[in-house]
Image (tube, grey):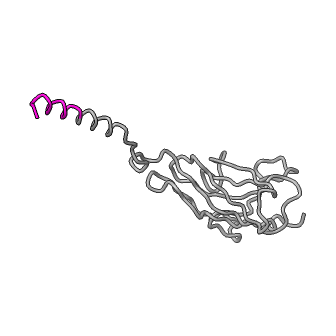
Amino acid sequence: MSKLSKILVLKMMLVIGIFVSGCENPSDSDSPPEAAKISGTVTFSGDWPTEGTVYLTINNKWPPMGAPYATTAITSADVDNSGKYEYQFKDVAFGTYGAITVSWLDPNDSNPATNQHIVGGYAGSVQSGFMDSKSVTVSEEEYELKGIDISANFDLLGPS
């Protein structure tokens, strides 16, 4: 093989090598996540309220102060026959949140200080009025929290 042929072969191999390496897709694990996901199941008990709105909320602080980080309304149609509602909050900013709770908004009470009734909180107890609900932290290392399950009891609202 002549010297010129060897040079051409080497150049072609170099071009092919650059082309192939440029076409590789970086793996998802190479780039850090930009936001988190929090998911779980809310298990409802008691009679669903005939009026008002039920909310699932990520609270910035607990006890609540100011607007929540994220809220989603839940209807009885969203709940399966066994009383379970599967939820997922996506694109949650990294940080620590005071609590994830389920509440009922009383449409007959216009006072924002008294019209929201907590019926469940993540790892919280009825005895404390769910004030002992656990905080949750999401970060680049812990960016997918699963099993953040909540029991919500409408019987806590009293007779309707």
Q: Is residue 47 above or below residue 100?
A: below
- The residue lying toward the viewer, choosing from 100 and 145, is 145
Q: Residue furthest front?
A: 1
If the image is split into quadrants, where does the N terminus sit?
top left
Question: Magenta span covers which residues?
Answer: 1-12
Disc tally is 0
Residue 132, horizontal then vertical, whole percent: 62, 65
Residue 130 vs residue 142, the one in the foreground? 142
Q: Residue at x 23, y 32 (%)?
A: 12
In the image: residue 117, left or right of residue 39: right
* Residue 45 picture location, percent across and down: 78, 69
Residue appearing at x 62%, y 47% in the figure: 69
In the rendered image, residue 130 lying in the magenta stretch gets the answer no
| Vertical position of residue 24 compared to residue 131: above or below | above
Vertical comparison of 43 with 65: above or below: below
Identify the residue at the far left of this view.
3
Quadrant assignment, res 8 = top left
The secondary structure that dominates the magenta segment is helix
Q: Along the line of sight, which residue is nearer the eye, 71 or 10?
A: 10
